Amino acid sequence: MTPPLDVTTFITDALPASDSRERRQPTPTASHRGALSKQAKSVLKAAATGWFVVAGLGQVIFVAYLFGFYGGTALLGQFEAWNQVFPRSHVVGDPIHNTVVAMHLAFAALITAGGLVQLMTGVRRWFPRFHHWNGRVYLISAFVMGLGGLAMVWTGTSVGDLSQHVAISINALLIMLCAAMVLRHALARRFALHRRWALRLFLVVSGVWFFRIGLTFWILMNQGPVGFDPDTFTGPALTTIAFAQYLLPLAILQLYFYAQDHAGSCGRMFMATGLFASTLLTAVGIVAASMMLWLPHLR
């Protein structure tokens, strides 16, 4: 039998022991803390989704530029026009170098578009067969792109200095490493780890894109080419951007994973704030790159 409710005890417990005339300040209950935690998770997810949407729109513009400029001039046989925006990308009398560059550009466009589609939850959920086949093509393209990048840097390009070549080489090796880890966890059916490595792969594959929006953001912020020589395309600013193009996104992603797994409500809200700020900076870089690098060549 349930004991009768002791009203006197109930009222006494509801008041502070020192002064019954003051009301006790309400303390967070388990349900209240649960609501805050759920809200923080939702805000963090919204911040991550917001960044992905903005970055996705920027990468769509980049893909349109790759197909529109390089593809359009290739169809017209005007390969020399490539050298106007990509020095020594087409060398008369060097078919091997030209083929490597053309394949690299083609794979860059395909892998950028394929990566955006691959990370869309709706595609993975509603079109699993397409997701699987697109994933296979994406991984193969990543390997080819990584190998092509190494070949271009060490055998066929005079753009940049040794530090930039090292940075690009590390990026290429990370692309192949992340692709291998994505495949490994997919085959082992460890899908949570598979998705995390897929996000890492998406970021390192996007290194070329990050470099461009980072460079144009730097030029816009300084109102000119500060910290590097635009003629030789060398300088500390370019070296920093060359390494930051993949190290910075990977670091932010790792902090996001930590906030998901271990942080409390305050930590998740702090991470969400950082992601919202990153989204704003990314948007500024995209607008600058579009106006300075991409859209002028599509007119």
Image: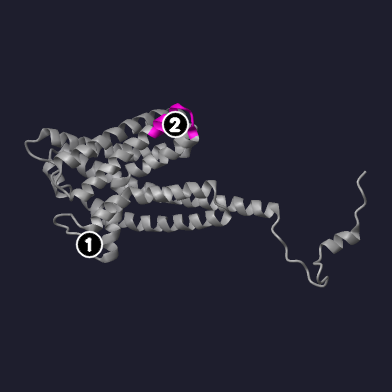
Identify the residue at the far front of this view.
Answer: 18
The residue sitting at 49% across, 48% down in the picture is: 258
At label 2, counting other C-alpha atoms closer than 10 Å, the crowd grade (few under 14, some 14-19, many 20 or more) is some
Instruction: State the image coordinates of residue 196 (x, y, percent, origin top left).
Output: 45, 40
In the drawing, what numbered circle is on residue 227?
Answer: 1
Amino acid type at mark 2? His
The residue sitting at 20% across, 57% down in the picture is: 235
Question: Toward the viewer: 22 or 119?
Answer: 22
Tell me the SS state at disc 2: helix
Residue behind mark 2: 185
Amino acid type at mark 1? Gly
* Range covered by the magenta-colored residues: 181-191
Residue 290 seen in the figure = no
Locate residue 178: give its quadrant. top left
Task: Say if 139 sits above or below 277 in the image.
Answer: above
Magenta stretch: includes residue 26: no
Where does the N terminus fall, quadrant-wise? top right
Instruction: State the image coordinates of residue 130 (x, y, percent, origin top left).
Output: 41, 29
